[in-house]
Amino acid sequence: MMEMNVCGTSTWMTQELEGFRDAVRRFVASEVAPHQQRWREQQHVDRALWHKGGAMGILCADIPEQYGGSDGSFAHQAIVFEELGYAGDMAFGIHVHAIVAHYLLNQGTEAQKRKYLPKLASGEMVAAIAMSEPGAGSDLKGIRTSAVRTADGYKVNGSKTFISNGYLADLVLVVVKTDLEAGARGVSLLLLETKDNPGFRVGRILEKVGQKGQDTCELFFDDAHVALDNVLGGVEGQGFAQLMTELPYERTILGVAGVAAIERALRLTVDYTRERRAFGQALIEMQNTRFVLAEVKTEATVARIFIDRCIEDTIAGRMDTVRASMAKYWISDLQCKAVDQCVQLFGGYGYMLEYPIAQMYVDARVQRIYGGANEIMKEIVARSL
Ligand SMILES: Cc1cc2nc3c(=O)[nH]c(=O)nc-3n(C[C@H](O)[C@H](O)[C@H](O)COP(=O)(O)OP(=O)(O)OC[C@H]3O[C@@H](n4cnc5c(N)ncnc54)[C@H](O)[C@@H]3O)c2cc1C
C-alpha cells in the first residue's frame, strides 16, 4: 500500500515501530477490511475480532506487561488507530476499550488493575464507558444515574445512551451519582460487570447516520449490581476529577484518527481524479481540482505536524488538556471540511456508499459531536486565554 502519511513518516516513528505498523496493517487487511460491510449490516463487529485483536497485542498496546498489556508506548497505540483510520474502519471500538484501560491504569486500585487489565488486553472482556444520558451529555454534572450502597456493593439505577461498544461490553465504566446532594463531588465511576447482572439491560443498537458497524447502544440499570470493590480508585466522589484527568487521552485519540481520515481522503481523491476524465482531460489536470487538493494537502500537512507533536507529548506524558481539546475540535472540523471537498471531486460517485469517500463522509460527522462537543472544547481552550 502506498504511504498515507502526508509527511512520509512521523517524527516519532522508529524502525521497531515500522515493524509493528506493518504487522498491524496486515492484521487490519485480513481481519478488519474484508468484514466491514457485514459488520455494518449486523451493527456490530464479531466478538471473535476482540479475541484476535487480543492475540495480536493491539487492544492494550500501551499498557505495561505486568497487567497483561503489550508494554508499548502511546506510539504503538497511535499506530493502531492510524491503521484502522487508513482502512476506513469505524466499527472496531478499540478506542473506547483503550480509554477504559487507561482509566484503570491511572486511576484504578492495584487489585482493580490486576483483575481487569489482563482481560481487556486479551479481549476476554470488551470495555465501554458510559457517561452520557438521555438528559445530559455535555453537562455531566446533570447526570441522574445513581448508585446506592447495599450490604455487598451498590445498586445502580438509571439509563445511559449513545454508548459505544454497548452491545458487546462485558465491563462498563459507569458514571454515577453516589451522593445526589454533593454536586461534582458526588460523582463516582463504577466498574460494572454485565454478565449475570439481571439489573443490567442493553437496549437497542441505535440507528446512526454513519459508523453503522459500531454497536452504539442505550443501557438500562434497574437495581444493577456493582461489587463494593468496584468504585474506580476505591474511594467515592473522585469521578469528576478522574474524568477531567483522563478525557485528554480520549481527545488526543480522536485527533489521531481524524488526521488519518484526512490523509486517506486525500489519497483516495488524488487516485480517483487521476483516473476520471471529463472534457478530454483527467480531473486532476483541471486547475480547480489541483487547487482544492493542494489546499487539502496543505491542511493535512499542518494537521499531521500538529498531531505528531501531540503524540510525542503524550508519549512523554506531557500532553495537556487545552492542547488535547484544540486537537479534538480543530482536526474534527478539518476532517469534515476536507472529506466534503473530496466528495465534491468524486461527483455523483462521491454520494454512493459503495465508494469509500461516501462512507467517510457519513462516518466523519459525529467526530465533531462525541468525545466532548467541539463547542465544549472551545470553552476549555478559552479558559486558558
Ligand atoms: C456515535 C456516538 C458515540 C458515542 N459514544 C459515547 C460513549 O461511548 N460514551 C458516552 O458516554 N457518550 C458517548 N456519546 C455521547 C457524546 O459524548 C455526546 O453526544 C456529546 O458529549 C454531546 O452531548 P449531548 O448529545 O447530550 O448534547 P448536548 O449536551 O445536549 O449538547 C447539544 C449541543 O449544544 C451545544 N452546547 C452544549 N453545551 C454547550 C456550551 N456549554 N456552550 C456552547 N454550546 C454548547 C453543542 O453544540 C452541543 O453539540 C456518543 C455519541 C455518539 C453520537
Image (tube, rainbow, N blue to C red):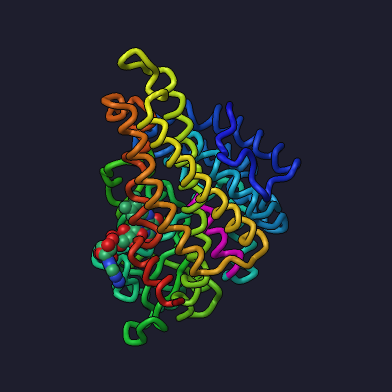
Q: Quadrant of the C terminus?
A: bottom left
Can residue 199 be seen here? The reply is no
Which residue is situated farthest in the left direction here? 135
321 is higher (above) or lower (below) than 43:
below
> In front: 175, or 223?
175
Q: Is residue 91 magenta?
A: no
Magenta-drawn segment: 95-106
Q: Is residue 206 left or right of residue 51?
A: left
Question: Does the image show residue 249?
Answer: yes
Q: Residue at x 60, y 68 (%)?
A: 106
The foreground one among 207 and 330 is 330
Q: Main secondary structure of the magenta part?
A: helix
The answer to whether 329 is drawn above or below residue 260 in the figure is below
Residue 25: image quadrant is top right
Residue at 28% x, 46% y: name it: 206
Q: Position of residue 161 (x, y in %)?
A: 30, 57
- Residue at far right of view: 15
Q: Quadrant of the N terminus?
A: top right
Q: Nearer the viewer, residue 283 or 31?
A: 283
**Location of residue 230 with respect to 327 vertically, above or below:** below
- Residue 82 placed where, x, y %? 54, 43
Image quarter for ligand 1: bottom left
Res 224 → quadrant: bottom left
